[in-house]
């Protein structure tokens, strides 16, 4: 006999044939998620005050009204010592109102509440996690008023949960690469054979269990897969969650930005409505990123239609960075609800280079074509030219051009060129023909 929850699941599927994953009334998740996440700012050192301060800052800085509505707690929110009566318990020293009390306050500010767990035996920081407890945890999250779950990929125990094969992604430490960044069966006999369907892997099973547990709740909760680009998630992420991490963690320095940009430039076919490659949380405001590096980072994350989850102490963010995060043109491109595809490289030979990724990018949108031109050089400014006939969807002639950084109308141009500083990006919108 069928359980009420599986009946509900089928009902939900029938009601939502157009949605890539199963949700009770799937009306959120079509576009990349915008918000804040605690990890890059605080790592494990989190509490209710910090989360509420971030939520208040989203409101005060106008970021909520610009679209950043998710307030996502990352790892370390629970009692570390283990489950209590089978449930993950919020650490009441850190979260005296519980997660439900915090969620009430966050909802009261017209924001959404996100939480974190792991599809393993313990979270990445060693707290109790959800593998084998998907139904219990999804039920608790729903009862607390959670809107979004980030599900991480650490501590895959017991060992029978390990995958049969290794997935070839250049961004993992347990794989042997050739000098040009390819994986070969000679170097790694455990690589999956060509044509292997990763839907038969244990990784697929670990993540889809939580999808099904969330879908069985009477509350819409988005699932974000923190799966590091493993298990060919590009093929099945769209039927499992709203976004999937396509790399290992970012860091607050330039090499991390170019490393991820390089990997993602090969993987953008899987990005469209309801399913997005997640290039990891933003480092705007963090580390030693220069002004130019920071705005290149933000421009590319927006252009690739990554979720944009701010990862800094919002109470100490410069006005320059607040304005960057609110850049009208980049946010409008990222959140375009008519054009689902991301910007992609053009004039590029598919060269694998973690330090010097593709330089010329374009993507269509309701506003016109977004064009980005990156200078990856460490020491020399570069002259860059956007030649219309080289850009997919454009042809020779003249177009109205707007500078994305300043909003300045550049007039009717036959091409656009700029001096681009070290690690900076020229960013324009190419509008109507003129
Ligand atoms: C709860 O958090 C406090 C403050 O960080 C910490 O000292 C304590 O060990 C934590 N309790 C558990 C059970 O994890
Ligand atoms: C699973 O995690 C718990 C802590 O949450 C730990 O005590 C246990 O040893 C772990 N099991 C394995 C197989 O690693
Ligand atoms: C691994 O073993 C546990 C029991 O220890 C079982 O519940 C689980 O389903 C197994 N996982 C797989 C992928 O077979
Ligand atoms: C990369 O190197 C391997 C051998 O190490 C070679 O077989 C392969 O053709 C190379 N690929 C490219 C794109 O150069
Ligand atoms: C491949 O890497 C593994 C460790 O991940 C190592 O044990 C093995 O020797 C390597 N194989 C080759 C051919 O280098
Ligand atoms: C920035 O930080 C990274 C990581 O700590 C470091 O490797 C790099 O050298 C730093 N760059 C500069 C310009 O200080
Ligand atoms: C993901 O699924 C949705 C709904 O079926 C579809 O609209 C979208 O285009 C898909 N994305 C990709 C990249 O296939
Ligand atoms: C605030 O930001 C400035 C740089 O903008 C930094 O030097 C300072 O350490 C930050 N203060 C705190 C408390 O994080
Ligand atoms: C920039 O510096 C890094 C080291 O941080 C180096 O590996 C890389 O090749 C340099 N990039 C370019 C484009 O020269």
Image: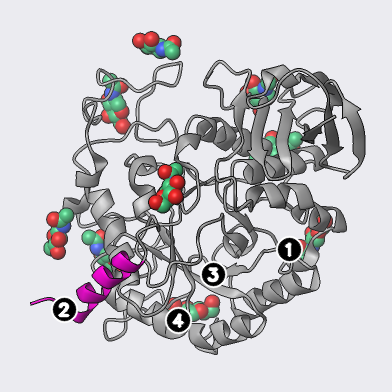
Residue at 63% in and 53% down: 335
Nearer to us: label 3 or label 1: 1
* Cβ–Cβ under 8 Å for marks 4 and 3: no
Q: Residue furthest left?
A: 1
Sequence-earlier tag: 4 or 2: 2
Percent coordinates x, y for residue 203 in the rendering: 27, 50
Neighbour tally class for label 3: few under 14, some 14-19, many 20 plus, Cα within 10 Å: many
Gap between marks 3 and 1 measured at Cα: 20 Å
**What is the spatial separation of the Cα atoms under label 1 and label 2, in whole angstroms?**
42 Å
Give the mark nearest the N terminus, 3 or 2. Answer: 2
Which quarter of the figure has residue 389? top right
Q: Secondary structure at mark 2?
A: loop
Residue placed under numbered mark 2 in the picture: 3
Label 3: which residue?
A: 73
- Residue 50 in view: yes
Residue 261: which disc?
none
Tell me the residue that label 1 is attached to: 66
Q: Is residue 150 above or below residue 344?
A: below
* Mark 1 touches mark 2? (CB < 8 Å): no
Mark 4 — residue? Answer: 90
Distance of label 4 from label 2 (alpha carbons): 29 Å
Q: CA distance from mark 4 to mark 3?
A: 12 Å
């Amino acid at each position: 006999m069928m359980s009420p929850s599986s009946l509900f699941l089928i009902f939900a599927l029938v009601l939502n044939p157009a949605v890539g994953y199963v949700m009770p009334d799937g009306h959120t998740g079509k576009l990349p998620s915008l918000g804040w996440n605690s990890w890059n700012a605080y790592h494990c050192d989190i509490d209710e005050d910090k989360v509420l301060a971030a939520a208040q800052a989203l409101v005060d800085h106008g970021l909520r009204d610009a679209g950043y509505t998710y307030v996502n707690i990352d790892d370390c929110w629970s009692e570390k010592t283990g489950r209590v009566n089978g449930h993950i318990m919020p650490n009441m020293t850190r979260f005296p109102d519980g997660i439900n009390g915090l969620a009430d306050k966050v909802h009261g500010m017209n924001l959404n509440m996100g939480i974190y767990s792991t599809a393993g035996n313990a979270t990445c920081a060693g707290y109790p996690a959800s593998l084998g407890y998907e139904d219990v945890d999804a039920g608790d999250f729903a009862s607390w008023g959670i809107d979004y779950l980030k599900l991480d990929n650490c501590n895959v125990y017991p060992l029978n949960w390990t995958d049969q094969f290794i997935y070839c992604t250049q961004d993992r430490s347990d794989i042997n690469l050739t000098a040009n960044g390819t994986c070969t069966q000679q170097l790694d006999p455990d690589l999956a054979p060509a044509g292997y369907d990763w839907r038969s892997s244990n990784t697929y099973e670990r993540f889809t269990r939580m999808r099904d547990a969330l879908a069985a709740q009477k509350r819409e909760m988005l699932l974000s897969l923190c799966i590091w680009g493993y298990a060919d998630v590009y093929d099945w992420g769209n039927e499992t969650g709203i976004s999937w991490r396509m790399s290992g963690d970012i860091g607050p320095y330039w090499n991390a930005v170019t490393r991820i940009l390089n990997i993602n430039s090969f993987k953008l076919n899987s990005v469209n409505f309801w399913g997005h490659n997640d290039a990891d949380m933003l480092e705007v405001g963090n580390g030693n990123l220069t002004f130019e590096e920071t705005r290149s980072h933000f421009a590319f994350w927006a252009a690739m239609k990554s979720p944009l989850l701010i990862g800094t102490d919002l109470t100490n963010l410069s006005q320059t960075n607040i304005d960057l995060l609110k850049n009208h043109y980049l946010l409008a491109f990222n959140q375009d609800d008519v054009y689902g595809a991301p910007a992609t490289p053009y004039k590029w030979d598919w060269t694998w280079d973690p330090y010097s990724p593709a330089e010329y990018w374009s993507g269509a949108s309701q506003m016109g074509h977004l064009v980005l031109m990156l200078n990856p050089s460490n020491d020399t400014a570069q002259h860059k030219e956007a030649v219309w006939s080289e850009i997919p969807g454009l042809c020779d002639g003249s177009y109205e051009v707007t500078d994305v950084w300043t909003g300045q109308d550049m007039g009717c141009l036959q091409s656009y060129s700029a001096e681009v500083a070290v690690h900076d990006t020229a960013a324009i919108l190419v509008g109507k023909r003129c």
